[in-house]
Amino acid sequence: MSADQEHSTCSGTAPDLHLSEAFISLGNLRHNLATIRAAIKPTCRIMGIVKANAYGHGAPEITAALEQEGVRDFGVANIQEAIELKQSYRMQADSRVLAFASPLVQQIGLYLRHDVEMTVCDHETAIAGEAEASAAGKKLRVQVKVDTGMGRLGVTPEEAASLLETIDRSPHLELTGIYTHFAESHIPDGFTALQLERFLQVTGAYERASGKNVLKHAANSGAIICLPDSALDMVRPGILLYGCHPLDSKPSTLPVRPVMQFQCRVIFVKEVAAGTTISYNRTWSAPDRRRIATISAGYADGFHRTLSNRATVFINGRTYHQVGTVTMDQTMVDLGDDLSVSVGDAVVLFGWEGPTAGQQAIAAGTISYELLCAVSRRVRRVFV
Ligand SMILES: *Cc1c(COP(=O)(O)O)cnc(C)c1O
């Protein structure tokens, strides 16, 4: 952050001034991690979820910051993301990366080569994994995913025992965990509790039959808040780490802080007469004489087109309505008769000032997760 800022809004300085920037507060990330730690038992591990480029925040930098705070477990969507992360940042030797996707058989060699933990949901993958690992003369670390009700990936609870047996009989497979994922974790009773019960039946039966202890994990952010009993041996927070709440319409009491502040700039200001229409399809017209600012972000930057005529933005400490259709590269803002805004001023689209990503998500008819992930490559990330 530069020293010459008039307001607390982050302002980049020339010569490498970017019109659209996402300021990433690693201090707020550390605060959120500490907040999550305080909410779980001290023996419970935390897997930092850094899929989708750490929800748009920058996976290498977020991973490094979490490692500094002692996190050693990381979750990504698939093997490609795992390889990208490992190639962009030299992780601690004792850090482990789990890829959540069920792999294609052709990808198994990559898990061995890059030392990534593989999710196993069926016998075919376990058998192919054993064959690959044996041929490579290596051990392949695997985690079994149980589908207790998410309906996305995983072995059914009924078939889990036989899959686990297959893995235990495979000399080149090492079982490092069993996990499941909740479908509506923000609702503690009913289905989430049922999913947890189904999961504990599977893991309990396995541990009794095998005489082994295995790492068990289930809780995403929603479950950390709503169903503390689901924390088990490890929790897997994503959105909470990034300072948003699992349910935008009902922020939890956990005092997390936004990690990203998405900003752009005022690049043009004009005054229009009553009746002047603004942007594509002329969805807004000035009710009277207005000052209109054009700002430097559109849907290609991640400012969703569904926000058209619905969003508010924050400039120099004040809130303004966005007007007209959001375009690919620019968006218009109604300044009313306000003379204080000028070209070059920073505009907060969401963050620790102005609207939160959650509030903007409600306006866009989506969830904060999607708005964070949508912040595109042409928006420069600035770590503060
Ligand atoms: C994305 C994801 C998470 C994190 O979810 P949040 O709601 O962001 O906490 C945890 N586990 C799995 C398997 C996931 O895919």
Image (cartoon, rainbow, N blue to C red):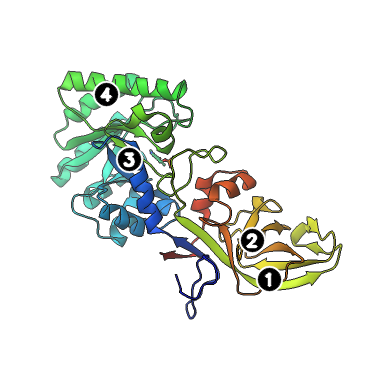
Q: Could you tell which of marks 1 and 2 lies nearer the N-terminus?
A: 2
The amino acid type, in three-letter code, at marker 2 is: Arg
State yes or no: discs 2 and 4 in contact (Cβ < 8 Å).
no
Instruction: Kindly state the secondary structure of the residue where label 4 is placed.
Output: helix
Say which residue label 2 marks: 318
Say what amino acid the circle numbered 1 marks: Ser
User: How many labels were placed on the picture?
Assistant: 4
**Badge 3 element:** helix
- Residue 309 in the figure: left or right of residue 75: right
Q: Mark 3 points at which residue?
A: 38
Q: Quadrant of the N terminus?
A: bottom left
Q: Reading the chain from its start, which is encountered first: label 2 or label 3?
A: 3
- In the image, residue 174 sits, relative to residue 293, either above or below, namely above
CA gap between label 2 and label 4 equals 53 Å
Q: In which quarter of the image is residue 86?
A: bottom left
What type is the residue that disc 4 sits on? Thr
Q: Distance between the residues labelled 1 and 2?
A: 10 Å
Dot 1: few (<14), some (14–19), or many (≥20) neighbours within 10 Å?
few
Res 49 visible:
no
Q: Where is residue 52 in the image (x, y as percent from the top left)?
A: 42, 51
